[in-house]
Amino acid sequence: MIRPRALGYFVPAFPTQTHAFFWREVAALRAQGVEVRLFSSRRPRPEDCPHAFGDIARAETRYVFPPRASAVARWAARHPAGMVRALGYLRKVTGAGAKGRAKVAALLPSAADLCSAAEAAGVDHIHFHSCADAAHLGALARRMGGPSYSVTVHGNLDVYGTDHAAKFADASLVTTVTRALRDEVLAVAPGRDVPVITMGVDTARFAGVRPTRPQGAPLRFLSISRLAPVKGHGYFLEALRRLIDEGQNVQYVIAGSGEAEPAIRAEIARLSLGDHVEMAGPLSQDAVRAALGQSDVFVLTSFGHGEAAPVAVMEAMAAGLPVICSRIGGTADMIEDGVDGLLVPQQDVDAIADAARRLCADAALRALIRKAAQRRAQSQFDTAATARALWEAISAARANGA
């Protein structure tokens, strides 16, 4: 294997609320002796990342938007042929028309800045955790004479724009987090070796977090996610209303922030659920662990595109919570229905209510699923193993000259 001198690690707008799993992967790579340097696009606001690692991550990360004019000029002067090759990449960008091509052209200075920053940091390979504009950035930088690059695809390709064949063409490696996403990649880049390597969680950190629940306490359901319409909070709220009308003693905690918060609050009011639902806001890593430990069932009723292998579900399973989860993305690969979680059709309130009702009524079932979920998480979702798999795949791809 040809291991990079230092591994560049690029996450757009890093770090934010939902980026704890990236930070865990970085920590796991470093624990295994990998020298990791962080890169990103724009610097997010400090309040966008409530986690304890936020200040450290921002201080470590090199941001390439806006690009440094001096770095761009120096790289262009030293690599004129590379700049011409990068301009040639624009001919491959056709999916979004002239407007899309202009958007990619605007990335050229940042790509040159990235090349310069990577060279200064001793980085000869960058892994991009995005298949959107960041992947264009990697392709442009490579053509400019910069580092080799690889890409992890986290969601359906149509969420990440167009021209994916161009993004993948010069990549040393493309990985996906589910088998379904691998099929999407192979449809636009046939013949590639596309390993499925999920993100992971620190399973040991979540083991044993469940406290003793007071007798007679409400059964507590929990969701932790970005507050977006596609997360489907409204479907579980409707199911919750049914359970309460049937006399079930239940509560629902919704953690996270996002554009759908006003709509969710309006739905809570419409269904008269104010006494049964808590809006917890964004949670730090420690607060996530505590919330899981104070809950009985985890809920993710997403629909549509954009969900792949939800890390929040992995964390819940590692903490021993039965999960009610939509069949979406790779969740059917993560959960065996009725064994280590309950899978429901998307947007199906009847099925969601039935699953919740089963768990309310059967403490023995909850206990069985709890143990099975922890076993699944420990065997398949541990971040040390998933980070090692990514590093070995990158090293192997470089050795093969990909």
Image (cartoon, rainbow, N blue to C red):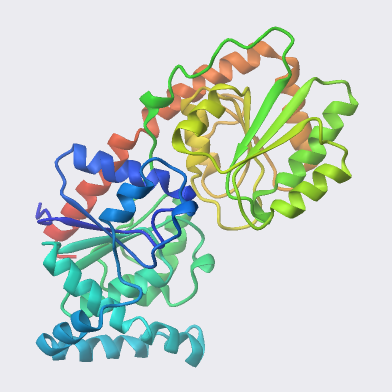
**Residue that extends furthest to the top in the rendered view of this protein:** 215
Q: Is residue 388 visible?
A: no
Q: Is residue 270 above or below residue 85?
A: above
Decide which of 361, 83 is in the foreground and name it. Answer: 83
327 in relation to 165, above or below? above
Q: Position of residue 316 (x, y in %)?
A: 52, 30
Quick one: 137 or 153, which is closer to the camera?
137
Query: In the rendering, at what x and y percent does residue 246 appear?
Result: 89, 24
Q: Pinpoint residue 116: horizontal percent, then vertical percent.
A: 17, 74
Compared to residue 24, the image places residue 151 above or below, namely below
The residue that appears at 16% across and 46% down in the rendered structure is 34
Residue 318 pos. (x, y %): 46, 27
Q: Is residue 185 left or right of residue 256?
A: left
Q: Is residue 229 left or right of residue 292?
A: right
Pick the front one: 270 or 97: 270
- Can residue 248 be seen? yes
Q: Residue at x 44, y 67 (%)?
A: 187
189, above or below 246, in the image: below
Query: Which quarter of the picture shows residue 351?
Result: top right
Seen in the image, is 387 located left or right of residue 269?
left
Look at the image and tell me in which quarter the C terminus lies: bottom left
Query: What residue sits 48% from the left and 85% below the top?
Result: 100
Q: Residue at x 21, y 88 (%)?
A: 83
